[in-house]
Structure formats: C-alpha cells, structure tokens
Image (cartoon, rainbow, N blue to C red):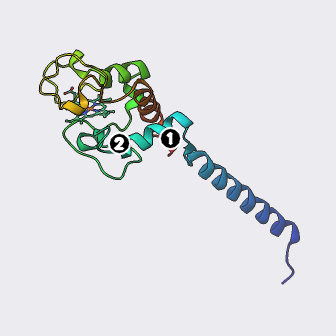
C-alpha cells in the first residue's frame, strides 16, 4: 500500500505540536528558583533550633512540619508580606493568648535564659528572609 506522505507529514507535525505544548506546559508548572532572600529564609526554616517554625507549621518545600499551628501552604493568597511579617514579629498583637513565640520582640517575656537576654529570637534580616520564602513557597524551588 502506498504511503500518503502528506498525511504522515501532517501527523508528525501534529505530534510535534502536541509534544511542544506538553513541554511548555511542564516548563510552566516547573517551580522557579527562589530569590536569594528566600533561599536564606529557607535555610533558616531548616534550622529548627533557630526558627522552630516547623515544630508547629507545615511549610511547602520543607520535609517535616507540625500541626500545632495552621499549615502555611497558600499563605501568600490569604496574607500580604507586611501582615505575615507582623504576625511573626509579635503574634500577640493578633492573639494575646497565642502559643507562637514573638520572634522580634523583647517585651512581656519571662524567665528568659541568660544566653538569650536582650536578644530577639530572629534578627530583622532573618525575619525578612523567612517572609520572602513564605511568600514564594508555593511556587519556588528552594
Ligand atoms: C509553638 C508553636 C508555634 C511556633 C514555634 C510558630 N508558630 Fe506560627 N502559629 C502558631 C499558631 C498556634 C498559630 C495560629 C494563630 C495563633 O494562635 O496565633 C500560628 C500562626 C501563624 C501564622 C498565620 C497563619 C495564617 O494562616 O494566617 C503565620 C504566618 C505563622 N504562624 C508563621 C510562623 C513562622 C514563620 C514561625 C517561625 C519563625 C512560626 N510561625 C512559629 C504556632 C506556632
């Protein structure tokens, strides 16, 4: 049976078009690399002793996470960066009885260990970096 070359050519072209769409679709869904601030934030989040966030929260991109606080998945859709920053700096402003530590506050603390007296848990820079990661965490590759 003779091969209809134009038909074959059309099929090949169509297969190529579909493949291109699939590749583009995959590239579209592929997470983008994190900004430098977000990468530093990610490292801080991994240091459980320093940040402690994963003891209470599930955070996209992190292998472990607790259930005491809400999952931080989809955070950027429900809060702005300044809101998230305030929330971490001093969660008592939103809930005076919160379990979450005030990461950038020196007031209202009792029984602070000698080594930590006069120091906030996170630095301003550390907090900004964590916020940068949290705001991108649903779509970045750390
Ligand atoms: C001891 C547990 C605990 C730790 C540690 C903790 N959190 Fe929380 N967090 C909570 C709880 C509980 C809430 C729910 C609101 C409340 O009670 O204040 C919360 C709320 C939040 C929210 C608001 C979530 C939302 O859906 O709006 C953010 C953002 C957040 N935490 C970020 C962090 C980050 C970042 C860290 C680490 C730097 C951290 N938390 C450490 C317990 C914790």
Residue drawn at the location 21% of the way across and 43% of the way down: 67
Q: In the displayed image of the protein, which residue is found farthest to the bottom? A: 1
x, y percent for residue 52: 28, 40
Residue drawn at the location 36% of the way across and 38% of the way down: 73
The residue closer to the viewer here, 74 or 13, is 74
The residue closer to the viewer here, 20 or 8, is 20
> Which quadrant of the figure contains the N terminus?
bottom right
Which type of secondary structure does the marked residue at label 2 adopt? Answer: loop
Ligand 1 image position (quadrant)? top left
Which type of secondary structure does the marked residue at label 1 adopt? Answer: helix
Q: CA distance from mark 2 to mark 1?
A: 14 Å
User: To which quarter of the image does residue 9 belong?
Assistant: bottom right
Disc 1 within 8 angstroms of ligand 1 (CB): no
In the picture of the structure, the residue carrying the numbered disc 1 is: 39
In the picture of the structure, the residue carrying the numbered disc 2 is: 59
User: To which quarter of the image does residue 12 belong?
Assistant: bottom right
Label 2 packing within 10 angstroms: few (<14), some (14-19), many (20+): many
Is residue 95 rendered to the left or right of residue 104? left
Residue drawn at the location 32% of the way across and 37% of the way down: 51
Residue drawn at the location 23% of the way across and 40% of the way down: 56
Q: Which mark is residue 72?
A: none
Total numbered badges shown on the rendered structure: 2
Disc 2 within 8 angstroms of ligand 1 (CB): yes
Q: Is residue 86 above or below residue 11?
A: above
Q: Is residue 13 above or below residue 125?
A: below
x, y percent for residue 135: 45, 31
């Amino acid at each position: 049976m003779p091969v209809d070359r134009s038909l074959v050519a059309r099929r090949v072209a169509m297969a190529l078009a579909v493949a291109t769409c699939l590749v583009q679709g995959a590239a579209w869904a592929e997470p983008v690399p994190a900004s430098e601030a977000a990468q530093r934030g990610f490292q801080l989040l991994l240091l459980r002793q320093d940040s402690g966030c994963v003891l209470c929260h599930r955070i996209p991109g992190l292998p472990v996470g607790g259930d005491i606080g809400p999952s931080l998945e989809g955070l950027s859709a429900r809060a702005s960066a300044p809101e998230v920053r305030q929330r971490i700096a001093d969660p008592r402003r939103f809930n005076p009885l919160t379990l979450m530590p005030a990461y950038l506050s020196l007031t209202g603390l009792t029984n602070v260990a000698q080594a930590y007296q006069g120091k906030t848990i996170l630095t301003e820079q550390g907090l900004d970096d964590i916020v940068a990661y949290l705001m991108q965490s649903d779509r970045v590759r750390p």
